[in-house]
């Protein structure tokens, strides 16, 4: 823990500040917004950033700053929920495939590879459009395209770990397969899974924002970063409409990647004694 807190990786610390800052903003946004994010004021349309509206207003006179803050609740929550679901599904699926092995492993991994054979974003678009535009359907579509990655990682970790001496000793002492998998193998695989999950949070937010940009995620008048960028693209003369939500997506994504890189360095066994 001491080495974790004393890491000299500046980008890792910066990533933590960015991610924690945005999460706090998302949690406290109802109390931080200066104006109602969905209230329309046609007399204040397309106002540039200034004292009255810190980040300007959109085509309906809504305050962009308030919408960016409230929109963080949807974008960040969608990314976190997607990663949490996929890591659980992928860990269970890949753990069973790697531990059982044989024909079961072959069949299960062929299913995962079948999903990976399709371009991820296009497959997510097809699933989300088939189910209908909504937040839950977009999260479900992203879960479908991402769980095979965790399953493949977990399978490779299980195959590597299950022949270790402490696993063999547990088997000789009469431990059940379920206990070995849950108590011995999964805890030792969590480090790699955590690093992958942290890196994927940014990707999930970008993907969800992309689906919302295409009209497959959140629906008006709910503010969300991707849909706000889409509104800004339709009004390119008013640069602030798409610039600020776009910067929010970029900052949260890059922050999550900085944290993931830092965790990978911290969990690298080659660096444990440094």
Image (cartoon, helix red, strand yellow):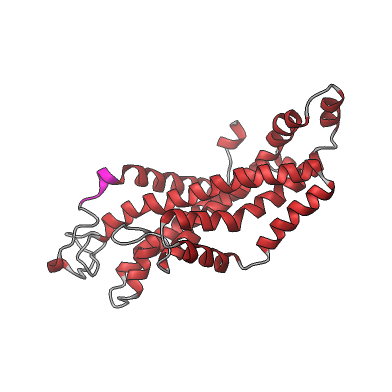
Q: Is residue 98 left or right of residue 89?
A: right
102 and 120: which is toward the camera: 102
Q: Where residue 68 appears, x then y in whole percent?
A: 32, 57
Q: Residue, x 30% and y 76% (percent of image)?
A: 235
45 shown above or below 86: below
- Residue located farthest toward the bottom when viewing the structure as drawn: 237
Residue 243: % across, % down: 36, 67
Q: Is residue 239 visible?
A: yes
Task: Tally the numbered discs.
Answer: 0
Q: Looking at the picture, how far across and down is residue 179, in whole percent?
A: 73, 28
Residue at point 49%, 65% (across, down): 130
Does residue 265 appear in this view? no
Q: Magenta part mainly helix, strand or loop?
A: helix
Relative to 167, say whether 72 is above or below. Answer: below
Q: Is residue 83 above or below residue 115?
A: above
Q: Would you place residue 198 above or below residue 232 in this image? A: above
Q: Quadrant of residue 146?
A: bottom right
Magenta residues span 30-34
User: Most extreme residue toward the left, as rendered?
Assistant: 43
Q: Is residue 32 magenta?
A: yes
- Position of the C terminus, as image quadrant, is top right
Q: Residue at the location (22% across, 68% down)?
A: 48
In the rendered image, the quadrant that contains the N terminus is top right
Q: Quadrant of residue 120?
A: bottom right
Say which residue appears at 61% left-offset and 68% top-offset: 119
């Amino acid at each position: 823990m001491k080495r974790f807190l004393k890491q000299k990786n500046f980008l890792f610390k910066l990533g933590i500040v960015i991610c924690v800052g945005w999460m706090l903003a998302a949690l406290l946004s109802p109390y931080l917004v200066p104006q109602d994010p969905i209230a329309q004021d046609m007399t204040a349309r397309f106002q540039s950033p200034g004292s009255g509206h810190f980040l300007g207003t959109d085509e309906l006179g809504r305050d962009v700053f308030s919408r960016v803050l409230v929109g963080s609740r949807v974008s960040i929550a969608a990314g976190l929920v997607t990663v949490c679901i996929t890591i659980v599904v992928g860990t269970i699926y890949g753990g069973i495939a790697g531990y059982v092995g044989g024909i079961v492993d072959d069949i299960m991994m062929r299913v995962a590879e079948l999903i990976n054979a399709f371009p991820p974003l296009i497959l997510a678009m097809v699933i989300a459009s088939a189910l209908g535009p909504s937040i839950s359907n977009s999260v479900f579509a992203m879960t479908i395209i991402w769980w095979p990655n965790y399953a493949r990682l977990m399978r490779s970790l299980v195959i590597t770990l299950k022949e270790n001496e402490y696993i063999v000793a547990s088997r000789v002492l009469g431990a059940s397969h379920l206990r070995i998998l849950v108590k011995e193998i999964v805890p030792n695989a969590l480090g790699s899974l955590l690093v992958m999950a942290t890196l994927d949070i940014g990707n999930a937010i970008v993907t969800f924002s992309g689906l919302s940009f295409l009209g497959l995620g959140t629906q008006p008048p709910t503010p969300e970063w991707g849909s706000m960028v889409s509104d800004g693209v339709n009004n390119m003369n008013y640069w602030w409409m798409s610039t600020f939500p776009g910067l929010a997506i970029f900052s949260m994504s890059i922050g999550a990647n900085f944290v993931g890189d830092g965790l990978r360095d911290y969990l690298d066994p080659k660096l444990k004694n440094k």
